[in-house]
Amino acid sequence: METNDDELGPLLEAPPPYFKLRRLIRSALGFPTEYRPLLIGIDGIDGSGKSSAASWLSWQLGMPAVHLDLYLIRDSEPLTWRYDDLSDVLDAQTVLQRPIIVEGVLLLRVLQKINRVPEFLVFVEKDQHDRCGQGRLRNELEAYLLTERPKEQAKFVLKWSSAKYDDRVMQAHLGRRELHR
């Protein structure tokens, strides 16, 4: 199957703040001469774009991204994660002396449970025009944001509206679907 570069274009782009963040992390890692074994944390409310940012950075910087959702214990209240499993994954990367990205809601609280602190913290903030979607996490997140203050601790606050970008990606997907008919 042939693909048109215009069709894939929106899928390969990133919002401008991503590129600024990539430059800052590259500098923190010591590029181009070093590759420091940093723990890079990406925090923010649910649905803000943490996973997208982590996946893009993982691809751009050639390092793994760990998504806390994979370690969440289903239907736990308060939210609880499989801390031992998460710690094992991070320990393995530490032994290799390699950097790693960890993203998820309540990130600082989860990392604290396994005696970790991110050396480079990013806070992803939703644009005021994007819908909230906090659902049942609302109370827990509000308390967390007030006590842990991840936005204030962050070395970079990533704020952008995904509305226009999401629309372009959807159009690319719809156009691609038409090609397969």
Image (cartoon, helix red, strand yellow):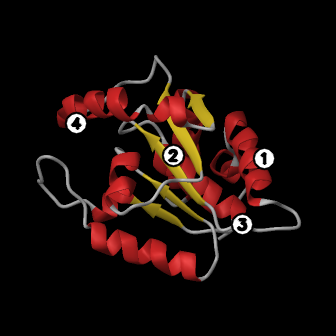
Residue wearing tag 4: 137
Q: Is residue 77 above or below residue 142?
A: below
Q: Is residue 169 left or right of residue 4?
A: left
Q: Crowdedness of circle 1 by 10 Å Cα count: few (<14), some, many (20+)? A: few
Instruction: Decide which of tag 4 and tag 2 comes sooner along the chain.
Output: 4
Q: Residue at x 49, y 81 (%)?
A: 92
Q: Which residue is mark 2?
A: 174
Amino acid type at circle 3 is Arg
Q: Judge depth for marks 3 and 1 and give the one in front.
A: 3
Q: 4 or 65, which lies in front?
A: 65
Outermost residue to the top: 128
110 lies above or below 161 = below
**Label located before the other in sequence (2 or 3):** 3
Q: Residues within 10 Å of mark 4 (few under 14, many from 20)?
A: some
Instruction: Look at mark 1 in the image and give the residue it sits on.
Output: 23
Q: Residue at x 20, y 29 (%)?
A: 139
Of the image marks 4 and 1, the number of the one nearer the N terminus: 1
